[in-house]
Image: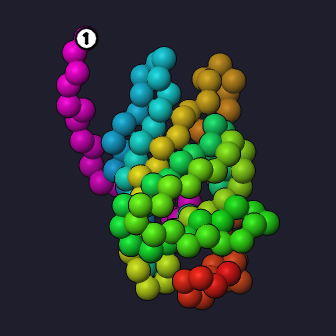
């Protein structure tokens, strides 16, 4: 097998049950066994963010542009800027998205769990309450 370019899939709007606001993503890579690596580019419009969720094998985010937030349940909100990279461990409930007045784009890198285990890649929970989303960058 030789190195070759991978096909680009279409831009897809994020499902309303997983996101608040307008979120779009491109699935850049979904590894074939033995690789279970996933790579998406995710674009959040101002104020858009995920619902609470957890990844079976963890997730790494790398911000490419804009200004955003990430928060693990029970922890402080972290402001994200271009060049920032954060990792959420396996099973840790968290959310992430854009600030209220800025777009935010990030690369999302994660692995699918072993298919023999029957565990989903991502478990989705409730959307954020109004008091959980910060009013302005740095607040939370």
- Residue 51 visible? The answer is no
Image quadrant of residue 103?
bottom left
Q: Which residues are magenta?
A: 1-20
Could you say where residue 51 lies in the image, as x and y percent from the top left?
Answer: 61, 64
Residues 93 and 126: in front is: 93
Give the dominant element type of the magenta stretch: helix, strand or loop: loop
Q: Is residue 28 magenta?
A: no
Could you say where residue 8 lies in the image, as x and y percent from the top left?
Answer: 24, 41
Residue at mark 1:
1
- Residue 4 visible? The answer is yes
Secondary element at image label 1: loop
Image quadrant of residue 50?
bottom right
Left or right placement of residue 128 versus residue 27 in this view:
right
Residues 87 and 25: in front is: 87
| Residue at the right extreme, as displayed | 74
Q: In the rendered image, which quarter contains the C terminus?
A: bottom right
Could you say where residue 95 lies in the image, as x and y percent from the top left?
Answer: 62, 63
């Amino acid at each position: 097998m030789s190195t070759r370019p991978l096909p680009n899939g279409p831009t897809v709007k994020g499902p309303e049950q997983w996101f608040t606001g307008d979120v779009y993503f491109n699935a850049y890579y979904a590894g074939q066994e033995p690789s279970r690596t996933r790579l998406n580019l995710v674009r959040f419009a101002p104020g858009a963010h995920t619902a609470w969720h957890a990844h079976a094998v963890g997730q790494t985010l790398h911000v490419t542009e804009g200004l955003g937030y990430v928060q693990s349940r029970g922890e402080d909100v972290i402001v994200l800027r271009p060049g920032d990279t954060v990792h959420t461990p396996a099973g840790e409930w968290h959310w992430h998205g854009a600030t209220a007045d800025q777009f935010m784009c990030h690369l999302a890198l994660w692995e699918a769990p072993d298919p023999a285990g029957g565990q989903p890649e991502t478990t989705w929970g409730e959307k954020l309450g109004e008091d959980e989303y910060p009013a302005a960058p740095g607040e939370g």
